[in-house]
Image (spheres, rainbow, N blue to C red):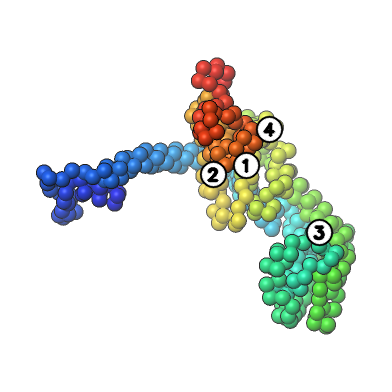
Amino acid sequence: MATRRTFLGTATAAGATLLLGGNVRTVARADTSPSDAARELQARDAIRAVNADTRRNYAALKADLTNHLSPVIVVQNDYRGGLYSLVSNGQVLESLHPVDEIFELAKSIAHIPLGIFTILAQYLPKQVPASQSARIDPHDLDMVAFKGPGDGWIQPLQDFSTTIDMARRQLEEAKLPDDLQKSCANVLDRAREFIADATRSRSFDMKSFEDFSGSVYPNIRANMYWASKAQIEGVTDIMTRWRKQLGDGAWKGLYVVVFTIWTTSVLNQNSIIIKKFMDPAQVDRHLIDISTAEIPSKPIPVALDNLARIVQDNIAAEMVFCTDTKLADALKGPEELLSEEILQLLGGAADAKAAGYTGGANANQVVCPFHNKSASDPSPA
């Protein structure tokens, strides 16, 4: 494919170019020859074409592979405990929320202190209290409290109180387990009291909010228990049913892709439970957590696209870097291939040693990437 750069280079070399009816006609001039700059541009474009072809073929393999991945479970973390989808050879066999709604209800009430905070945050005083000096970053506080003290929070807080009042009046009709109902009632009551005091005095501070949030902490933990219990039971049921449906042979090769928001990506609740149902010998390679700023609107095709990349890289790594297990592991995982080389060049001996490198003949020598194994090493990659 001719790029603007190659076209201009060709035109310079030929001396003149005429575009007639969409066709290119070159008129040669005996007194001209390609300039050094033109030849350089053409040569570099020829090199870039190698990468373009590689990327195109890589994408084609990945696109085809997505239709052959099986079996796959895709989990979209959400406020209902997770949307679970079972996929085989690119086809969705079943998609459902397996977790009982007790999960959502318990968490809904547990979120009330956070809900109040989100209304008050921008109006916080910007001075970190002495009691929090070791825990709160002053710059973080300055960013969050971007308005500073004022009364713009009063109406939104009163509106939230109306929502809380409605939930409290109908709480018994929700038919929650007794312990959960009592816990929710206390959170709702304490929240109404805090809001009434704050709006009456038209003031609040960190201390008054922390007194409120601290008073309902035991109830928050109780609600966390009920949410966790519901999630464990729901995920256990669906994983057990799908394993029976697929059979142990297919289940052994199961891939699971879990989408999580970055702030919940470590020890993600769904991944913790799912791990117990996967083949222990495969789980480290076949359970993939993907953290993201926003859960994709179409999680299944995104999951399969990412999974296909991971699976084909697993094989490519061992074949392309057959003489260097360290680089093979980098291609198979989230490590950037150039990361250790950059550490070597930026950090000197200490970082190089930490990265497993040995020094070259001189301090400025770039180390050959095939440093861990020699071509004659008979051990398997």
Q: Position of residue 176 (x, y in %)?
A: 82, 61
Quadrant of the image for the C terminus? top right
Residue type at tag 2: Asn
Q: Horizontally, is 185 left or right of 322 in the view?
A: right
In 3D space, how far apart are the residues under numbered discs 2 and 4 (Cα atoms)?
A: 21 Å
- Image point (53%, 21%), residue name: 374
Q: Position of residue 46 (x, y in %)?
A: 32, 40
Q: Badge 2, how many Cα within 10 Å: few under 14, some, many 20+?
A: some
Which residue, given by chain and number where applicable, does mark 3 sit on?
Answer: 134
- Image point (15%, 53%), residue name: 18
Which residue, given by chain and number where applicable, does mark 2 sit on?
Answer: 306
Residue 349 drawn above or below residue 380: below
Instruction: Tell me the number on the disc at residue 279.
Output: 4
Q: Badge 3, how many Cα within 10 Å: few under 14, some, many 20+?
A: few
Which residue, given by chain and number where applicable, does mark 1 sit on?
Answer: 288
Residue type at tag 4: Asp
Quadrant for residue 296, please give it.
bottom right
Q: Do labels 2 and 4 touch, CB within 8 Å?
A: no
